[in-house]
Amino acid sequence: MNYEFLKNYAVIVDCGSVSAASRRLNTSQSALSRQVGQLEEMYGTELLIRHPRNVEPTEAGMRLYRYASLLNELDRRILQDMQDIAAGVGGTLRLGLTYNYDERITKALVNFHKMYPRAKIELHEEHSPAVLGMLKNDLLEIGIVTLSKIRDPEVEIVSESKMNMYAVFPRDNPWGQKDDGKEITLKSLIDIPLSTSKGFQDDLTKAFRNLGSIPHYMSSNVNLEMSLMWAKAGVAAAIVMTNDQRQVQTETTFGKILKIREFSELSQMIVINKGKNLSLVAREFLRNYMNTKA
């Protein structure tokens, strides 16, 4: 397999024509056309539809383009990492996060930056399945997800901690007094303005609908801190997931465990690709995380 041909093929698709790609690559059109022909012969299928002034990928060609684009991105990242290491920076930490990561992650990132101030940090906030997908496509080295379990044999769980779902109320507000004790039911939250994370809002809506109700979302947020902000302001009850009770029990707020079957077995997991070597910065971040207390 000629990786250079694949990378050049991706440029042809990006440019929309062989002539434009030849100018970008400083390579003759005939050489690029021969490369495409050899790829089509190798894979036994047509990759490009040739028009007088442009080309467009076939279905097989578009599939190959996605793989070839990954090669170009990998080539760019290798060059960047090597330049970073040569300059004494140490490379780039590529980390995927769900929207409801806990305070321990924040502390570990801050401590890591203090220890390695010249290392670059590339963060991607996505839903858990998207983080796993990016991890398996080698766009990330470390993923932080919130799931009940992971059955994928290619994914290794480095750390796992049980998560609880809390309803968090302003202390001077009667909303949280509907249920006695340390727990509260979803039924008690009907008609109360809610502040939630985008990461689990769809599943929370389904749970409300199973009760024959529609939730009153006052705010949809990208992380736990933003959800809690509205509870601290006294305008909404925050629905958050955390393994640290101190985040919900504060001078201005109190939290009760929200009992919902769909969320009862969720854990926050630190995951990596099984059997693949981690970069120095990724190994150092994991070591820093393990030594960070919530």
Image (cartoon, grey):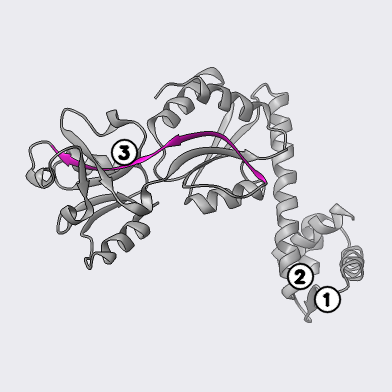
Secondary structure state at the residue bearing disc 1: loop
Magenta residue check for 165: yes
Q: Mark 1 points at which residue?
A: 46
The amino acid type, in three-letter code, at marker 3 is Glu
Q: Residue at 16% across / 38% down in the picture?
A: 181
| Residue 173 visible in the displayed image | yes
Q: Are marks 2 and 1 in contact (CB under 8 Å)?
A: yes
Compared to 59, does 220 lie above or below?
above
Q: Work out whether residue 187 or residue 146 is closer to the camera in this orientation and state it.
A: 187
Q: Name the residue under label 2.
A: 61
Q: Which of marks 2 and 1 is nearer the N terminus?
A: 1
Q: Judge the density around disc 1: few (<14), some (14-19), many (≥20) Cα neighbours within 10 Å.
A: some
- Give the left or right position of residue 86, taking residue 239 as reference: right
The amino acid type, in three-letter code, at marker 2 is Gly
- Give the left or right position of residue 100, taking residue 270 as reference: left
Could you say which quadrant of the image residue 242 lies in?
Answer: top left
Q: What stretch is highlighted in magenta?
A: 154-170
Magenta portion: prevailing SS class: strand
Q: Residue at 15% across / 32% down in the picture?
A: 252
Q: Work out whether residue 210 or residue 46 is closer to the camera in this orientation and state it.
A: 210
Q: Which of marks 3 and 2 is nearer the N terminus?
A: 2
Q: Mark 3 points at which residue?
A: 225
Magenta residue check for 225: no
The amino acid type, in three-letter code, at marker 1 is Glu
Q: Are marks 1 and 3 in contact (CB under 8 Å)?
A: no
